[in-house]
Image (cartoon, rainbow, N blue to C red):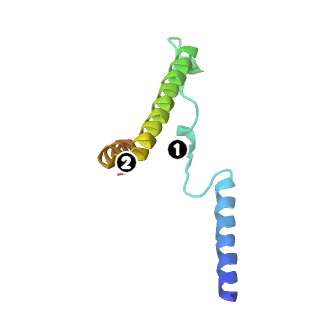
Amino acid sequence: REDRQRRYEENAQLFNDAMNELAAPNPKGIGEDAIVRAQPTMIDDDDGEQHKKAVSWIEVIYSSFVEGLSTADFITDILILRDLWLSDNLWWTTFMLSLLIAPYLVCYS
């Protein structure tokens, strides 16, 4: 029991140290070049002046529309998977589940 308590306290201390390191203004391992890359994009005009690139409303509306369609598609896929599962269609359920997780497998491989 005491060993368990000691391990818990060590893990809590490690967690707190990690959170404090992440909360620092410039955590270890991040150089000035990485901080500069995180700044907003600057573009040059014809007269040489630099301005921040503004995101147009059309881009915001378009990306919101696409994300909405993607979310609706995912919800309908889950509903179809549920119906296939409840109707005991093992092969179609397996096929549908593999199609649902395929993008994540590609993304993380």
Q: Residues within 10 Å of mark 1 (few under 14, many from 20)?
A: few
**Between 79 and 17, the one nearer to me in the picture:** 79
Q: CA distance from mark 1 to mark 2?
A: 56 Å
> Residue 91 shows which numbered tag?
none
**On screen, 22 above or below 47?**
below
- Residue 82 versus residue 63: which sits nearer the camera? 82
- Foreground: disc 1 or disc 2: 2
> Viewed as shown, does residue 25 lie left or right of 35?
right
Which residue shows up at 29% across the image and 47% down it? 91
- The residue located at (37%, 48%) in the rendering is 88
Residue, disc 1:
33
* Vertical arrangement, residue 13 with respect to residue 77, above or below: below
Circle 2 SS class = loop
Q: Which residue corresponds to the image point at 37% horizontal and 46% vertical from the top-left?
A: 97
Position of residue 39 in the picture relative to residue 25 (left or right) = left
Residue 13, image x, y percentages: 69, 71
Residue furthest out toward the top: 46
Q: Earlier in the sequence, mark 1 or mark 2?
A: 1
In this view, the residue in front, 78 or 47, is 78
Q: What amino acid is at disc 2? A: Asp
**Residue 101, x across and y down, in percent:** 38, 46
Check whether the beta carbons of the residues at disc 1 and disc 2 lie within 8 A of each other: no
- Residue at 51 percent across and 28 percent down: it is 67
Type of amino acid under label 1:
Asp
Q: Residue furthest bottom?
A: 2
39, 85: nearer the viewer: 85
Question: Residue 88: which disc?
Answer: 2
Whole-percent x, y for residue 103 in the image: 37, 42
